[in-house]
Image: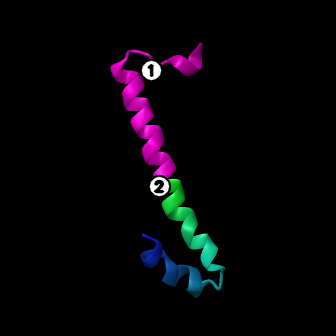
Amino acid sequence: MFLAYLPIIKFYRLSPIYAMGLPTVALIYILITIDSARRHWRKRNNYWQN
């Protein structure tokens, strides 16, 4: 993902560090989704509302 995003970063003349943002956000999203599924299976899906 980093390598696929790098040409766009270079096109806009940004630091290559920005290319790490997309994989990092994707990993965080995956972890949150897994946690949400785990809470749903345990019937605790409305934890944040209490």
Instruction: Give me the residue at 38% from left, 22% from top.
Output: 40
Q: Residues within 10 Å of mark 2 (few under 14, many from 20)?
A: few
Seen in the picture, residue 21 relative to 40 is either above or below; the reply is: below
> Dot 2 corresponds to which residue?
26
Question: How many numbered marks does the figure carry?
Answer: 2
Helix, strand or loop under label 1: loop
Q: Magenta span has 24?
A: no
On the image, the x and y values in percent for residue 13 come to 65, 86
Amino acid at dot 2: Ala
Q: Residues within 10 Å of mark 1 (few under 14, many from 20)?
A: some
Quarter where residue 39 is shown: top left
Gap in angstroms between the C-alphas marked 1 and 2: 22 Å
Helix, strand or loop under label 2: helix
Instruction: Give me the residue at 51% from left, 80% from top.
Output: 6
On the image, the x and y values in percent for residue 48 come to 57, 21
Q: Left or right: where does residue 46 sit relative to residue 14? A: left
Seen in the picture, residue 15 relative to 36 is either above or below; the reply is: below
> Dot 1 corresponds to which residue?
45
Seen in the picture, residue 47 relative to 13 is either above or below; the reply is: above
The residue stretch that appears in magenta: 26-50
Quarter where residue 35 is shown: top left
Quadrant where the C terminus is found in the figure: top right
